[in-house]
Amino acid sequence: MQTEVAPNIKNDLLLQAAKGSPTKRPPVWLMRQAGRILPEYRKVRAKAGSFKNLVTNPELTAEVTLQPVDILGVDAAIIFSDILVIPEALGLPYEMVEKKGPFFPKTITSAADIEALKDIDPYTDIHYTIQGIKIVKEQLSGRVPLIGFAGAPFTIFAYMIEGSGSKTFSKARGFLYRYPELSKQLLQKITDATILYLNAQISAGANLVQVFDSWASILPEKQYKEFGLKYIHQICSSISKVPVTVFAKGVTHGFDLLADLPCETLGIDWNMNRSYAIEKAKNKTLQGNLDPCVLYADDQTIVGETLKMLDDFSDVPYIANLGHGVYPDTDPDKVKLFVETVKTYSHENK
Amino acid sequence: MQTEVAPNIKNDLLLQAAKGSPTKRPPVWLMRQAGRILPEYRKVRAKAGSFKNLVTNPELTAEVTLQPVDILGVDAAIIFSDILVIPEALGLPYEMVEKKGPFFPKTITSAADIEALKDIDPYTDIHYTIQGIKIVKEQLSGRVPLIGFAGAPFTIFAYMIEGSGSKTFSKARGFLYRYPELSKQLLQKITDATILYLNAQISAGANLVQVFDSWASILPEKQYKEFGLKYIHQICSSISKVPVTVFAKGVTHGFDLLADLPCETLGIDWNMNRSYAIEKAKNKTLQGNLDPCVLYADDQTIVGETLKMLDDFSDVPYIANLGHGVYPDTDPDKVKLFVETVKTYSHENK
């Protein structure tokens, strides 16, 4: 797999680190940085009227994508969107229920339901995100790289079977045992759509893409290999122009399996043991790990925990981030403190 | 720690296995066997009017505790109760909201809230469960052992701070960073109450007790040692008359830490790698691991997966169980098939 650092990016720390090149300090961004915590975001969100209106409006999407670059000073933008645009493009629309999360009125229950799914064309079916990326790229003028993203196939599968979030995802997991072949058909359809979608994001200007496997940890290792990793592998193999990051939340014990993926960077959640991750990462770049709850603490704790993390990862290629999306009730000033702490850290001063 | 097998139990397979003694076949029971899946349970539940009415009525509690012994043929009863009786006894009442789960109108937010918690007397504050145990023991007439239980201190702490279930428990985790000393005070109060409660259950007739750490996996290892394991250790050390099982769901990577606890048995969830668990268990008895979603599959898959599990654990002391509570929509006939498969398994025929 070739990865080439985009030539027109002024601050390309993220791309250098993803490539495994030494950087004067680690780059820093936050999962969920676009949205939730910023009052400026909430104004745009209110103007949009609903979460989905915001996701499907390229101008507003671009506006909230750029906010954290300007306000928090992070080293990358990540396009504001939702992993569930893929099932919707496939023919399974969803609603975002306030304070509850996603809800699919129709779910996948049979072979006929899978047959009925559409072949997607990201340029028409998810045109709003592709268009949003183009606007962001123009307005960024190469200040920092732009990250594109998609959900991992099993995570998308879980929502399409379950119809909503769940503590156990027992319907989705039960489907794997009851209909293993149908499960694979559905996962393949999701994978094919995701590959088209990510490559469209890259063509529109995304400089790196991240695959989020939010529900990876609900599967035993054997099933995760068969129904999870296999499809992520296909995605990684299909992307050659930009670096790929895979973040499989909660996959602590089987982390060495992730390290075999043909991707550049592995995200690690706040529970991951650092020395274990470094040992198992097989020279891949690591990203994340700070407990988002640290940002509820006093300034001294935030600075101390952040510096400790940077020191712990100082001998490996590393991208500073939290171990989970920033929590909605986090004070933006605490986020700024985290970002500033990383930006004033120097590998030489360690 | 001494454990002695109760002399008046006819089928004492569970206690033998918990002690690490060889058994002709593994004992079998299911987490959440009392309730949820049985139509007979739902009748009693309807009669009680609400979940909490059922928990606080010793006669009805006893009735639903005995049902799985009679109907499913399991090798142990487990008292029907709820881990949240402890916060309620401490002075924090809760409601059980249909289809949503527990809700605490009042939560812990300050030192004063912790100060205000009561010292508990399980014989008055949780008399219904203690009385329920006595009734069950009488009606069991020594057929199988009775399991008592409580939540692990951190899991109870999480509910008392958060006020309900949560995907992230970010309030509870944030409390640990903001108020580490207060957190320890609260955890100690919960621990002291839990020790009194479990010993009261044992005095009333419980032959083994299990500590459920449902939210163990949301803490990084360092915090889990400091705010989780330390208090479970105290509980294990305070129980000398019966074997203790600790089930810390999701603690896959730090399983070797659990193996240092002074308890007899470690529960393992459906995600746990079997050879890793066996390697790290330091000769403790293991319990559980079958994915509850296997019970959604066809009979052949259920028998096959169960036998494979029994074979995989055949060289170590082992108690057959699922890796999570049985899911509410599981067909009772599938549960019976699982139980029968274990009961007809013989270590010699392997």
Image: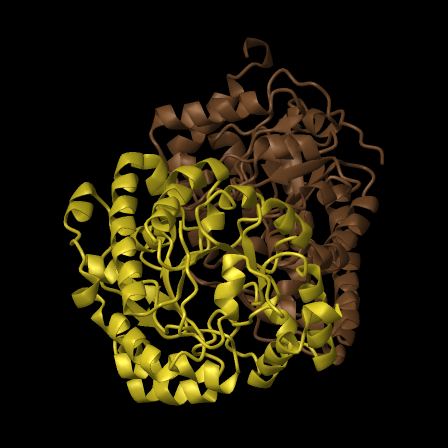
Chain colours: A yellow, B brown
Q: Is residue A106 left or right of residue B306?
A: left
x 75%, y 50%: residue: B232
Q: Is residue B184 left or right of residue A146?
A: right
Which quadrant would the N terminus of chain B be assigned to in this image? top right
For the image, the number of numbered tags is: 0
Is B32 in front, or is A9? A9
Position above or below: A187 against B174: above
Asked whether the viewer can see residue B329, the reply is no
Q: Quadrant of residue B161?
A: bottom right
Is A240 in front, or is A88? A240
x 23%, y 67%: residue: A126
Is A341 in front, or is A1? A1
Is B300 in front, or is A128? A128
Q: Is residue B297 left or right of residue B77?
A: left
Q: Is residue A92 left or right of residue B271?
A: left
Position above or below: A60 against A180: below
x 76%, y 76%: residue: B116
Residue B128 location, x and y as percent? Answer: 65, 53
Asked whether the viewer can see residue B124, the reply is yes
Residue lying at the far top in this picture: please name it. Answer: B349
Residue A122 location, x and y as percent? Answer: 21, 63
x 26%, y 79%: residue: A57
Which quadrant would the C terminus of chain B be assigned to in this image? top right
Position above or below: B199 against A300: above
